[in-house]
Amino acid sequence: MLIGILGLNTLFEIAVAIAFCFFPERFFSQESLSPLAIALARVVGAGALAIGSLSLFFVIKQTSIKSKQILFPAIATLSIFHLSVAIAQWINFSNQAAPLAIGIIHSLLAAAFIYFSIRTRSLIS
């Protein structure tokens, strides 16, 4: 199940990375489109690429998952990332600055990675 969640995260984050790095203008209205907005979107895309790459590493190297001491920091990092993005997106949604779907997706990924962080941590304790 963890490999499935990591695979889903990989696909999601790499898709976001491609979209934000190469097509950032599609995420802004004409009124809010500016060089700064495009630059920030590309930075978000770079971060998404890093997070997607972290997941991809564990999907490709499934044998590494047997080493819980390597896996725990990665899963904890993904938990923190998705939890913090979920909180930011819920705030943005409440200010009508982001779609609801983004907050839901990050919340679900945060919950899944927190669950696996707790399970993995208890196995190495």
Image: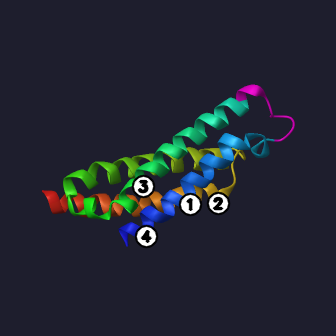
The alpha-carbon separation of the residues under discs 1 and 4 comes to 15 Å
Q: Earlier in the sequence, mark 4 or mark 2?
A: 4
Q: Is residue 108 above or below residue 42?
A: below
Residue 64, quarter of the rendered image: bottom left
Instruction: Give the residue type at disc 2.
Output: Ala
Q: Earlier in the sequence, mark 3 or mark 1?
A: 3
Q: Nearer the observer, disc 4 or disc 2? A: 4
Image spot of residue 109 (x, y percent)? 47, 60
Residue drawn 54% across the image and 60% down it: 11
Q: Which residues are magenta?
A: 29-36
Kindly indicate whether the residue at mark 3 contacts the one at mark 2 (C-beta within 8 angstroms).
no
Residue drawn 72% across the image and 47% down it: 96
Q: Nearer the viewer, residue 44 or 84?
A: 44
Quadrant position of the C terminus in the picture: bottom left
Instruction: Give the residue type at disc 3.
Output: Ser
Name the residue at the top extreme: 36
Q: Is residue 64 above or below residue 43?
A: below
Secondary structure of the residue carrying numbered label 1? helix
The alpha-carbon separation of the residues under discs 4 and 2 comes to 20 Å
Kindly indicate whether the residue at mark 2 contacts the one at mark 1 (C-beta within 8 angstroms).
yes
Secondary structure of the residue carrying numbered label 3? helix
* Residue, disc 1: 105
